[in-house]
Image (spheres, rainbow, N blue to C red):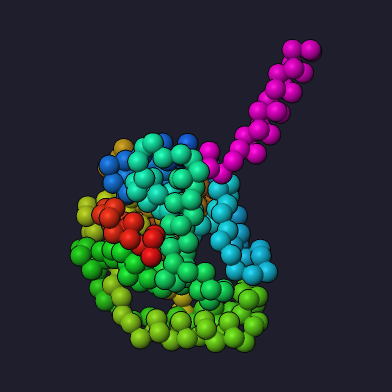
Amino acid sequence: MKKRFTLGVLLTIATASLAQEPIAVKLSQWASAGGKTPAETAVQVGKQLIGKPYVANTLDLNATEQLVVNVDAFDCTTYLETVLALSLARFELSAKATPAQLERSFQQYLTQLRYRNGRIDGYASRLHYFSDWLRDNERKGLLTDVTRELPGAMSVAKPVSYMTTATYRYPALRDPAVYRQMALTEAELNQQTFAFIPRKNIRQAESQLREGDIVMLTAARPGLDMKHVGLAVRQPNGRIHLLHASSEQGQVMITAQPLSDYVLYHKRLSGIRVARLRAGSGALTAVVNQ
């Protein structure tokens, strides 16, 4: 009995210590796997978070907009942003960088990825629509939309209006000024066409997908551009699967089904868009230091 009690106490202490582990240490441990490119690093980092719980709305808990860093629970967007920011920071810095330096660079990249022009300026400066997120981060030189280059892609125009028509989901839009800002963002997005790969064509494009590709799953419902996001990973069966934070399964995981089958199974999805991290570290330094 005494031995079991002692072991239990030790396990409790170890668990408590792990829970209180500084963010910088966690980031450093996850980034240690590394990779030859930011995309390879993203896959390695992303896999280390498998099993982390899915929690929605973690960015909306503060009265004023600010950078939220949560490395213990994710929704699909915060998972992707966390993995990409850490991968870019790790690829940017030398292997000798301290955990504090890595954390500082990680926060800079997270801000760049999450906010328009990389600057926090209220709720509407956050890139809520993924079409906006993709466009802004491509403009900043962090990634490239490669959808048009893939087999089976087609160009479409799809108006977005979900946020301003479902304001009950977004308390910040009760402020008329914030509402107007979001309406302007929607109006700007609605002037553009974009390429996507319809669900029936994803299998055709699969051979051209790469590990670490950013996969954005487009929504079938009117008024919404993208419904889900994750990373492409190639499994031992040779097929591309999705590494993502799953609301259905309540955790970070790799889909049991190949990506094309996963999208076909989920009727609320209409297809995918695909982007790739850029590998030029010099450009990335310029973005962070602007």
Q: Is residue 185 visible?
A: yes
Residue shown at 27%/42% (left/top)?
A: 36
Question: Is 216 situated left or right of 147 in this image?
Answer: right
Q: Position of residue 30 (x, y in %)?
A: 46, 39
Residue 279 belongs to the span the image colors magenta: no
Q: Position of residue 267 (x, y in %)?
A: 44, 65
Residue shown at 70%/22% (left/top)?
A: 10
Residue shown at 59%/41% (left/top)?
A: 22
Image label count: 0
- Out of 120 and 151, give the one closest to the viewer: 120
Residue 21 belongs to the span the image colors magenta: yes
Q: What span is colored magenta in the figure?
A: 1-25
Query: What is the chief secondary structure element of the magenta stretch?
Result: helix
Question: Is 48 situated left or right of 6 in this image?
Answer: left
Q: Is residue 199 above or below residue 100?
A: below
Quadrant into which the C terminus falls: bottom left
- Out of 96 and 46, give the one closest to the viewer: 96
Question: Is 20 situated left or right of 132 in this image?
Answer: right
Residue shown at 31%/37% (left/top)?
A: 236
Quadrant into which the N terminus falls: top right
Q: Position of residue 12 (x, y in %)?
A: 71, 28
Residue 159 falls in image quadrant:
bottom left
- Out of 233 and 197, give the one closest to the viewer: 233
Q: Residue furthest front?
A: 289
Residue 94 falls in image quadrant:
top left
Question: Is 172 situated left or right of 46 in this image?
Answer: right
